[in-house]
């Protein structure tokens, strides 16, 4: 079992059953602050189910989840400190860029001046200063991806975010995600079935199959 010392996110004895089917069996994993971790495996291996349990979108049958020292095992999604990005970039189309970025900060009851300053800081960090008044529909796919990253709070969850894109755009955007993740310092979990993708962006790769973790290691160790 991984050591909890210094871990930002700790999963302990996570089981998930759907009726008689065991989707996840005794998952133990620790993720460090600022780490980029990929859940890698074929369709049906349990990687997306595990991500959804971290997000609170599924409830584990057994086991505990601790994030930043707080037990979130039964906390609803709204009380968990994370942002999630699916194949679409999960922006609110009716809100401006600034309002999208501010959404998570407002949810955490930050003061108005602090929110405005942090929005500007984040937009500058992702290379989109001055874009606050625009709406998502006015931005390119790559720009929307950057905005989605800027909205990320303590933990960013990515569920196959690049799978709908063509190969050239996918390589460009995954490099951009990795670069922005480093500059923002946000702890990130990405689900993918693409080994090359996992090897190119992850600090550590969690190889999953049949609902269990088969291997955890750096890209060099896994390769």
Image (cartoon, rainbow, N blue to C red):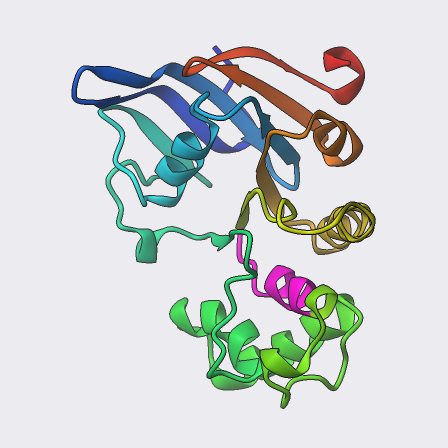
Examine the image and state in which quarter residue 151 appears.
bottom right
Give the camera-side residue of 68 and 37.
Answer: 37
Q: Is residue 155 left or right of 198 when viewed as pictured?
A: left
Name the residue: 81% across, 16% down: 220
Residue 123: give x, y in percent of width and height.
71, 74
Q: Please, which residue is most extreme toward the bottom here?
A: 133
Quadrant holding the C terminus: top right
Q: Would you say residue 39 sits in the magenta stretch?
A: no
Examine the image and state in which quarter residue 109 appears.
bottom left
Residue 206: give x, y in percent of width and height.
59, 21
Q: Would you say residue 145 sits in the magenta stretch?
A: yes
Examine the image and state in which quarter residue 219 appears.
top right
Q: Please, which residue is most extreme toward the left here?
A: 19
Is 48 rendered above or below residue 174? above
Q: Is residue 76 left or right of 6 when viewed as pictured?
A: left
Q: Please, which residue is most extreme toward the front here?
A: 166
Q: Is the magenta stretch mostly helix, strand or loop?
A: helix
Give the camera-side residue of 5 and 62.
Answer: 62
Give the camera-side residue of 201 and 30.
Answer: 201
Is 93 rendered above or below residue 156? below
Number of labelled discs?
Answer: 0
Q: Is residue 202 left or right of 33 when viewed as pictured?
A: right
Residue 54: give x, y in percent of width and height.
40, 38
Magenta segment boundaries in residue numbering: 144-154
Name the residue: 47% across, 28% down: 47
Name the residue: 45% across, 34% down: 48
Residue 2: give x, y in percent of width and height.
52, 15
């Amino acid at each position: 079992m991984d050591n909890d010392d210094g871990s930002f996110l700790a999963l302990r004895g996570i089981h998930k059953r759907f009726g008689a089917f065991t989707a996840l069996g005794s998952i133990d994993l620790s993720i460090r602050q600022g780490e980029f971790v990929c859940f890698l495996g074929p369709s049906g291996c349990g990687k997306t189910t595990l991500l959804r349990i971290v997000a609170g979108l599924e409830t584990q049958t057994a086991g505990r989840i601790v994030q930043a020292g707080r037990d979130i095992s039964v906390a609803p999604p709204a009380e968990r400190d994370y942002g999630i990005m699916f194949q679409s970039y999960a922006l609110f189309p009716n809100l401006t860029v600034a309002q999208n970025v501010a959404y998570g900060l407002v949810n955490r009851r930050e003061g108005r001046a602090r929110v405005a300053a942090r929005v500007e800081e984040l937009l500058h960090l992702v290379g989109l200063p001055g874009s606050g008044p625009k709406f998502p529909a006015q931005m390119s796919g790559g720009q929307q991806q950057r905005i989605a990253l800027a909205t990320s709070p303590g933990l960013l969850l990515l569920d196959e975010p690049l799978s709908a894109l063509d190969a050239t755009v996918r390589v460009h955007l995954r490099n951009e995600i990795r670069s922005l993740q480093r500059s923002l310092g946000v702890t990130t979990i990405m689900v993918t079935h693409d080994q090359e993708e996992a090897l190119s962006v992850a600090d550590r790769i969690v190889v999953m199959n049949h609902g269990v973790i088969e291997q955890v290691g750096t890209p060099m160790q896994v390769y």
